[in-house]
Amino acid sequence: MQNRWNDEEAARFEGDLGLRVYTSRLLGQDKSLVLHGGGNTSVKIREPDIFGKETDILYVKGSGWDLETIAEAGFSPVRLDHLIDLARLPALSDPQMVNELRTHMTDAGAPTPSVEAILHAIIPYKYVDHTHADAVIAVTNTREGRQRIEEIYGDDVVVIPYIMPGFDLARLCAERFAAEAHDGTIGMILMNHGVFSFGPDARTAYERMIQLVSRAEDYLASRRAWHVTMGPSREETPVDKPLRLEIAALRLEASRLAGFPLLLATHRDRDCLAFARRDDLPRITQQGPATPDHVIRTKRLPLLGRDLKAYAEAYRAYFEEHAPRARAALTMLDPAPRVILDAELGLVTLGRSARETDIVADIYRHTMEIILRAESLGGYQALPAGDIFDVEYWDLEQAKLRKSGPPPRFAGEVALVTGAASGIGKACVKALLDEGAAVVGLDINPDIQQAVDHAAFLGLVCDVTDEQQLRESLENAVRRFGGLDMLVLNAGAFPASRPITELDTAHWHKVFRLNLDANLALLRESHPLLKLSPGKGRVVVVGSKNVAAPGPGAAAYSASKAALNQLARIAALEWAGDGIRINTVHPDAVFDTGIWSEEVLASRARHYGISVEEYKTKNLLKTEITSRDVAALVTAMLGPLFAKTTGAQLPIDGGNERII
Ligand code: ZN
C-alpha cells in the first residue's frame, strides 16, 4: 500500500483543517481504501466562539462530499462536548442523532455531519481517519476473521464486532475503547466494516492507516490470497456477435420490475467475463455484499443469469421475512437487481443514471476481488441477511429516499442524436442531458468523442451513410446504456445554392444519401430497440421550412427533406401499433449550425436582396431562432406533453406567411 504523503504538497495546506483536507484527499485517491463517498475523517480544533470563549469543535466530513475532492467547506463543525455527552446516553434513535448533530453545528450552512460523527468524537486523538479498506474487509469476511485480525494486529488495535453504523456502534466503540485502548493503540478494526486510525497530527493518523492496511495486505500475500485469478477462462473473449436485442429485452424486463426506466451497462472485459463464468458463483456470490456500506447501491445479492422473475420473488421473500422485526412500517424497495452476472454479458449493472451504473460497477469490481481473496484465505463469509436488511432498510436511508423528490424527466432513458457535434444536434444533446437522459451522439466529426464532458454522454464517430457503422454504433450504445428510447434524426447537409440546370445527378444522390437514405437505415435498425423501450419509443425528425415552402436553388435539399418528411409520416402510421411515436419539427433560419457557413448565409441574403442581419430575422415575429430554441422543442416532443401526438409537424420559424 503506497504512502502518498509528500512534504512539498503538504506545505501548501495551511492550519489544522488544511492538513485535514490534504490527508483526506490522499485517502480518497486510493480506491482500495474508499469508494464513492465511503470513509470519513475528522479533526478536533479549539477555537473561540462568537463570545470569544474557547470551544472544542469536531470538524467531521459532511454528507455529500467525497474524500478525494473534499475542501474545507466539506467539513461540518460540531460542538465536541455535546457529542461526548450524547455517547453516554443509553439509547438514541438514528433520526434523533441526526437532529442532535445538525442542531449543534456552529455553521448553519455546513453540510449534515457524517452519521459516524459521534464515533469520531469519542476517540481521544486530534486526527481520526476511517476507511473501508478492501484488504481488511477481505480478512474480516472469512470464517476465522476475528482470529486472523488478532494474528495480524495483536494488541495494536481495538477490535469491534459487527454492529450497524449509527448510535449503537458509536456507543459500543466508546465502551471498548475506554476499556481496551492503551498508549500503543494505533487503530480500531470494525469487523465486516472497516478501519479507524488516529494520531496527534494529520501525518501520523494517515501513515498509521497505511501501515494498518498494509499489514492486512501482507498477511493476504503471505497466504497467496492477494493476487487472485478472476476465473478459469482468461482467454480472449469469443468473437463478438450482436447482443443489443438481448440486452434491450433484459433492460425492459428489469425496468418493468422496478416500475421505472433503468439504464443497464454491460462490462465485458476479461476480468468480468472470467468471474461471471466461474462454476462456484452460486456459493460465493449469493451470501451477501462484502460490506453493508455497499448494499444501498448494489442490493443484497447479484442476479446470476437472466431469470428476473425468480430474482424478484426471492427479493419479496427476503423483505417479508425480515421486515416484521423492523421498528417502523417499511415500504418494499423495487425488486429489480442492480448487479447481474451473466456468462455472455459479463458484469451487468443497473441504475437510474449513468453515474449510478458506473458506481455500482466500481463497487462490484472491488467486491469480486474481496470475495476471491477471502476465498483464497479459507472461505468468504458475508454477514447474515438480517444485518444486511437492517442497513438496506435503515430509517436514515428511507428518509433520504422520501426527501429526494421526483427524478428528472428522462431519468433512466437513452436518447440517440445524429449530427451531434455541432448546431442543433449538440444543443439537443445538452438539453437531453439536462433532463436526465443518457445520450449517444453520432457524428462524422471526431470532435464528437469529446463534445460534452458528462458521464451520461457517449460520443461515437459514425458516418451515418454507412449502414455497418450505424449498426456498430447502435451495438455500442446499447452495451453502454442498455437500450434506446428516443431518437433524434438531425444529421443533414445543406449544400450551397445550385439551380436545377446546373444540378448534376452525383450531387443530387450525395445529398439524398445523407438527408434521406441514412435516416431510413437508422429508423429501420432502431425499430426493434424502440419497441423494447420501457417508456415507449419516440422519434423526432429535424425537418425544414423548405418542406412546405421551398426556395429556388435548393432542389436537392428541399426534395430530400420532403421525402424524409413523407418517410416520417409513414413510420408514424406503421409504428403506432408498437407505441412508437414520430413527430417532426420544421426549423427555419437557425444560423448557429454547422451547415450555415458564411458563404451560404451571404448567398441566401444576396438572393433575397437583403443584408445578412435582415435575413437572420426575416420572419413575421422578427425574431432570431437559435439551436437552443429548436432543442427545447425537440425535447418537449420527446416528453410527456406530446405523449398522445404522432405524425405531427411543428414549425419553429418565427412565423412564415408561406406556411401559415
Ligand atoms: Zn464506515
Image (cartoon, rainbow, N blue to C red):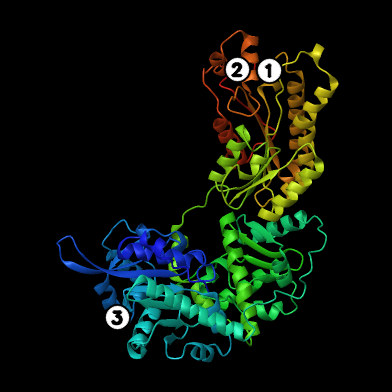
Residue lying at the far front in this picture: please name it. Answer: 8
Residue 89 circle label = 3
* The C terminus: image quadrant: top right
Q: Residue at x 58, y 67 (%)?
A: 363
Q: For the residue with label 1, is its CB less than 8 Å from the closest atom of ligand 1?
A: no
Q: Quadrant of residue 482?
A: bottom right
Q: Position of residue 275 (x, y in %)?
A: 71, 72
Q: Earlier in the sequence, mark 3 or mark 1?
A: 3
For label 1, count other residues whose C-alpha is less than 10 Å away and answer few (under 14), some (14-19) or many (20+): few
What amino acid does circle 1 point to?
A: Ala
Residue type indicated by callout 3: Leu
Residue count near mark 2 (Cα–Cα under 10 Å), binned few <14, some 14–19, many ≥20: some
Residue 411 position, x and y percent, is: 57, 51
Check residue 369 in the rendering and tell me which mark sits there, or answer none: none
* Residue 323 can be seen, yes or no: no
- Residue at the image position 71 percent from the left and 19 percent from the top: 496
Q: Are marks 2 and 3 in contact (CB under 8 Å)?
A: no
Q: Are marks 3 and 1 in contact (CB under 8 Å)?
A: no
Q: CA distance from mark 2 to mark 3?
A: 75 Å
Q: Nearer the viewer, residue 7 or 356?
A: 7
Q: Residue at x 70, y 34 (%)?
A: 491
The residue beneath circle 1 is 549
Circle 3: element type: loop
Q: Are marks 2 and 1 in contact (CB under 8 Å)?
A: yes
Q: Which residue is under mark 2?
A: 656
Task: Assess disc 3: are there few (<14), some (14-19) or many (≥20) residues with their C-alpha within 10 Å of its C-alpha.
Answer: few
Relative to 285, say whether 377 is above or below: below
Q: Earlier in the sequence, mark 2 or mark 3?
A: 3
